[in-house]
């Protein structure tokens, strides 16, 4: 899910969609915030609880996503009968940096819409592509000849495997299925626009939905998890991706990011369980009132589910039971309590809490927080119907400030320091002293934003014999599973 935001009351922080478990808010900035929403295999299940971190030294620059453009709310899409193509941004590099692409069997490189003056070039691999002042410069090795160089005009550059070659391209040590499109994003932020980032080149893979999904499921779930969990995740990920595709249509040059701003994607996967789960659920999506559900999901809800509206999106069309906190009574106490991330504790020096709030306030339209004094209390201001903390009151000096739970989480997570990562916004804060230093101890539950399917909870259900349909019925209340394309 992921790329994040501030729209109205929501901010970028909220965005990390599901994870990865990807889910995303109404708009997203170009540079993904680091987030940890989705469940995934980065920390093995069953791993010991995270130790209380020693007070970190706050030296690195704090990074927050820039404000994204805000778009008007959009109705949920109706299912298509044809399998759609997806555009997935797999990375972004500074303009001028070399982009090495490899492919067994060679490549075909062509400028899009450049006319007959600039024909496609069939070449050996690897090649090194660079954005130049006049367009693109590609160094390659045409089959059977010495290395050479080719120039292309400024436009989108399409790179595909040559006929007969394996259909995956290698970039950044990962094999990516699909067709690669290189898009230069101008200094004003280009199509998706944040406005402050320098010129960059986005690497976008164009790939059919069913070919894209196996690498998502493989990355989102642990290898040993049940096939029913995989199938439930496949249907949720397909629904999520479909809604994202519709949401971004005409607004930017890709639908999803391979990462937590949207959902994880490892490219080509050999995970047979993931491949089988996607095949067994081909075309199936979650639907309410004839329209597809934005099926957000996250790693572990901690027993306290969240609602999409107010957590990940401001879009009123997403106010449906399927992505609301739902029937809290049924889920509390019987979801993901066995997960290693069911509860956690993190300690951050009080001075760092203040500096992170200030930095976050500066880029998220909160001048009051940008000038906050040393905080003396952080208390839960509001809980949702399921008991999850959704906003906090901060006290500093003579002033008090309100901040959303996900915003607080993202503010604290600005330094990319896993030891002090707040895994969810469902937390309580206590002011303590650690080695004589004033600190804040955050105690929380779960991992991720808590909206929709809880991956650890789904696996618990599957272990007890539940089917994918039963898992989805529990986490997306009122939604039915419909097969859109064959
Ligand atoms: Zn849960």
Image (cartoon, rainbow, N blue to C red):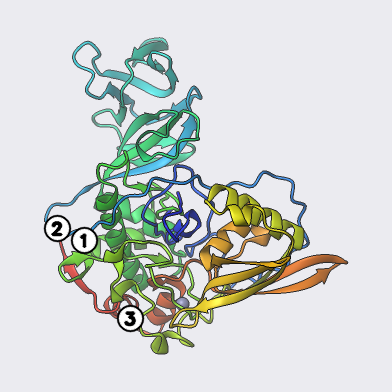
Discs 3/2, front:
3
Question: Disc 1 or 3, which lies upstream in sequence?
Answer: 1
Residue 417 appears in the rendering: no
Asked which quadrant contains residue 117, the reply is top left
Q: Is residue 147 left or right of residue 44?
A: left
Q: In the picture, residue 321 is in which quadrant?
A: bottom left
Q: Residue at x 24, y 75 (%)?
A: 479
Classify 408 as above or below 151. Answer: below
Q: State the residue position of label 1.
A: 282
The reply to whether dot 3 and dot 2 touch (C-beta < 8 Å) is no
- The residue sitting at 38% across, 42% down in the picture is 89
Cα–Cα span, label 3 and label 2: 24 Å
Q: Does residue 317 appear in this view?
A: yes
Q: Name the residue carrying label 3.
A: 474
Residue 155, by quadrant, is top left
**Residue under the image location 39 percent in, 81 percent down:** 461
Give the mark, 2 or 1, whose residue is nearer the N terminus: 1
Name the mark nearer the viewer: 1 or 3: 3
Left or right: residue 241 versus residue 67 is left
Which mark identifies residue 485?
2
Q: Tell me the quarter of the image containing the C terminus.
A: bottom left
Foreground pick, 13 / 374? 374
Q: Can you give x and y, in whole percent of width and height, for residue 325 in the image?
A: 39, 77
């Amino acid at each position: 899910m992921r790329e994040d935001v501030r729209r109205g009351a929501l901010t970028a922080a909220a965005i990390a969609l599901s994870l990865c478990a990807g889910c995303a808010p109404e708009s997203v900035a170009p540079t993904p915030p680091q987030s940890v929403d989705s469940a995934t295999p980065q920390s093995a299940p069953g791993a010991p609880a995270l130790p209380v971190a020693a007070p970190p030294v706050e030296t690195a620059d704090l990074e927050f996503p820039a404000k994204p453009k805000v778009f008007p709310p959009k109705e949920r899409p109706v299912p298509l009968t044809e399998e759609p193509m997806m555009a997935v941004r797999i990375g972004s590099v500074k303009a001028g940096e070399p982009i090495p692409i490899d492919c067994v069997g060679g490549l075909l490189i062509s400028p899009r819409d450049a006319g007959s003056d600039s024909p496609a070039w069939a070449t050996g691999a690897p090649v090194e592509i660079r954005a130049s002042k006049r367009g693109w410069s590609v160094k390659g090795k045409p089959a059977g000849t010495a290395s050479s160089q080719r120039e292309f005009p400024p436009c989108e550059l399409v790179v595909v495997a040559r006929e007969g070659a394996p259909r995956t391209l290698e970039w950044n040590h990962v094999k990516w299925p699909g067709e690669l499109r290189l898009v230069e994003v101008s200094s004003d932020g280009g199509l998706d626009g944040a406005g402050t980032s320098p010129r960059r080149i986005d690497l976008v893979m164009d790939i059919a939905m069913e070919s894209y999904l196996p690498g998502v499921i493989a990355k989102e779930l642990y290898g040993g998890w049940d096939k029913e969990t995989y199938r439930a995740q496949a249907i949720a990920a397909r629904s999520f991706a479909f809604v994202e595709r519709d949401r971004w249509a005409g607004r930017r040059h890709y639908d999803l990011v391979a990462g937590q701003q949207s959902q994880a994607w490892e490219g080509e996967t050999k995970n047979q369980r993931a491949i089988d789960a996607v095949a067994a659920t081909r075309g199936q999506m979650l639907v309410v009132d004839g329209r597809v559900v934005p099926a957000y999901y996250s790693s572990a809800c901690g027993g306290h589910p969240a609602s999409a509206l107010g957590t990940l999106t401001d879009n009123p069309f997403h106010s449906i039971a399927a992505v609301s906190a739902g029937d809290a009574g049924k889920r509390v106490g019987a979801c993901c309590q066995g997960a290693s991330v069911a509860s956690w504790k993190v300690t951050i020096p009080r001075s760092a809490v203040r500096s992170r709030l200030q930095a976050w306030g500066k880029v998220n339209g909160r001048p009051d927080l940008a000038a906050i004094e040393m905080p003396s209390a952080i208390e839960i201001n509001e809980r949702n119907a399921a008991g999850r903390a959704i906003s906090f009151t901060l006290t500093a000096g003579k002033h008090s400030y309100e901040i959303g739970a996900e915003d607080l989480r993202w503010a604290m997570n600005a330094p990319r320091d896993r030891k002090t990562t707040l895994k969810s916004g469902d937390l309580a804060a206590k002011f303590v002293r650690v080695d004589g230093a004033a600190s804040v101890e955050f105690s929380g539950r779960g991992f991720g934003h808590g909206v929709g399917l809880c991956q650890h909870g789904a696996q618990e259900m599957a272990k007890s014999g539940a089917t994918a349909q039963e898992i989805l019925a529990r986490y997306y209340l009122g939604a039915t599973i419909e097969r859109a394309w064959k």
